[in-house]
């Protein structure tokens, strides 16, 4: 199932080139009072809501997908967890290029660990990416994004996929420079998630997914998730050994070689096998 959020916070089921408006099922969500929960209420209740989504879809208003503005499929993640240098060839290109490492020591992911991006940086496809510090180099980084579906702490990798609600395409936009990663990757709109959430049952094994990003029609990055240094299961195990992961938390799994700058006016076309594709404007 492909679930999207669109326009004025409406909920949709994507079928082909149409969006079925199933916003009415949001009335089934529990009502929370202050203090608000640390998780995304929709993702936390997704298993409960799926039958209602299927029923609502039978009579739902249908809209052309091309006519809606897609929002991030996750509205309220508690954390955006990101995996640095998680492809060997990307590690090699960073080490070889001063414009990427800026004399900062770059370690592989086993030494570097994970880092957090500000949740305020999260947007959907329709928002585009507004460049921050355009006088500096701003790069695209395409990544498989994993959305956590239930509370996870100290998870073992053999059980890790049972904690996944679904998958999306992630763009981890990056300002190059000597500062900490979390600062340079957290401006508004620097975490693009979309175009929708593909439920985990449609991707039973996230290993071996082909993906590509083009800028103005030119292929920049083309790789496969089988080349991840830490795969999805290991990333969930690693992250949950430090943090409690809550429903709606997103793990950006890392980017392959081929990172390159974008400029205002560019158009990025990102595609991941089993998920779909999205076109994101650079503003």
Image (cartoon, rainbow, N blue to C red):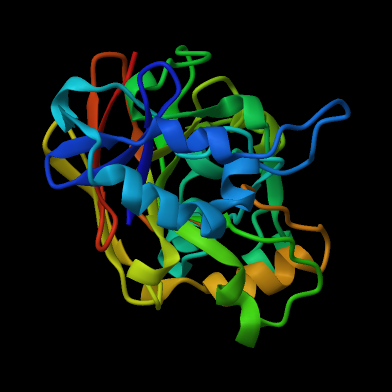
Q: Is residue 88 above or below residue 140?
A: below
Instruction: Name the image quarter holding the N terminus.
Output: bottom left
What residue do we see at 70% from left, 48% from top?
Answer: 115
Considering only vertical position in the picture, is 176 above or below 15? above
Q: Position of residue 222 (x, y in %)?
A: 25, 58
What residue occupies the far right of the structure in this picture? 35
**Residue 249 pos. (x, y %):** 64, 49
Q: Residue at x 74, y 76 (%)?
A: 155
Q: Residue 47 location, x and y as percent?
A: 53, 60
Q: Is residue 269 visible?
A: no
Location of residue 60 by image quarter: top left
Instruction: Name the residue rendered at 23%, 46% in the picture.
Output: 58
- Image quadrant holding the C terminus, namely top left
Report how many numbered discs are placed on residues in the image. 0
Instruction: Name the foreground residue: 100 vs 270.
Output: 270
Residue at image point 46% right, 47% down = 97
Among the 4 quarters of the image, the one containing residue 24? top left
Q: Residue at the bottom extreme?
A: 158
Q: Quadrant of residue 72?
A: top left
In the image, 263 versus 212, the foreground residue is 212
Q: Using residue 31 as the reference point, say whether residue 280 is left or right of it.
A: left
Q: Is residue 69 left or right of residue 192?
A: left
In the image, residue 134 above or below residue 55: above
Q: Is residue 151 visible?
A: yes
User: Where residue 94 sits: x, y (%)?
Assistant: 49, 52
In front: 259, or 62?
62
């Amino acid at each position: 199932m492909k679930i999207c959020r669109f326009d004025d916070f409406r909920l949709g089921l994507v079928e082909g080139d149409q969006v079925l408006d199933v916003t009415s099922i949001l009335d089934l969500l529990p009502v929370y009072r202050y203090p608000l929960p640390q998780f995304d209420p929709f993702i936390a209740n997704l298993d409960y809501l799926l039958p209602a989504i299927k029923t609502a879809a039978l009579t739902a208003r249908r809209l052309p997908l091309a006519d809606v503005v897609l929002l991030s499929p996750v509205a309220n993640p508690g954390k955006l967890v990101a995996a640095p240098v998680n492809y060997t060839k990307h590690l090699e290109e960073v080490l070889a290029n001063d414009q990427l490492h800026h004399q900062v020591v770059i370690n592989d992911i086993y030494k570097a660990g994970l880092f957090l991006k500000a949740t305020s940086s999260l947007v959907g496809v329709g928002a585009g990416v507004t460049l921050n510090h355009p006088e500096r180099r701003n790069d695209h980084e395409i990544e498989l994004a994993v959305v956590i579906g239930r509370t996870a702490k100290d998870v073992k990798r053999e059980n890790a996929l049972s904690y996944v609600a679904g998958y999306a395409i992630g763009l981890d936009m990056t300002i190059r420079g000597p500062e900490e990663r979390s600062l340079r990757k957290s401006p508004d709109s620097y975490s693009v998630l979309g175009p929708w959430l593909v439920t985990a049952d449609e991707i039973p094994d996230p290993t071996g997914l082909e993906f590509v990003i083009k800028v103005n029609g030119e292929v920049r990055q083309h790789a496969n998730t089988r080349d991840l240094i830490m795969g999805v299961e290991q990333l969930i195990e690693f992250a949950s050994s430090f943090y409690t992961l809550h429903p709606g938390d997103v793990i950006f799994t890392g980017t392959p070689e081929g990172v390159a700058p974008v400029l205002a006016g560019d158009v990025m076309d990102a595609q991941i096998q089993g998920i779909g594709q999205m076109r994101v404007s650079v503003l």
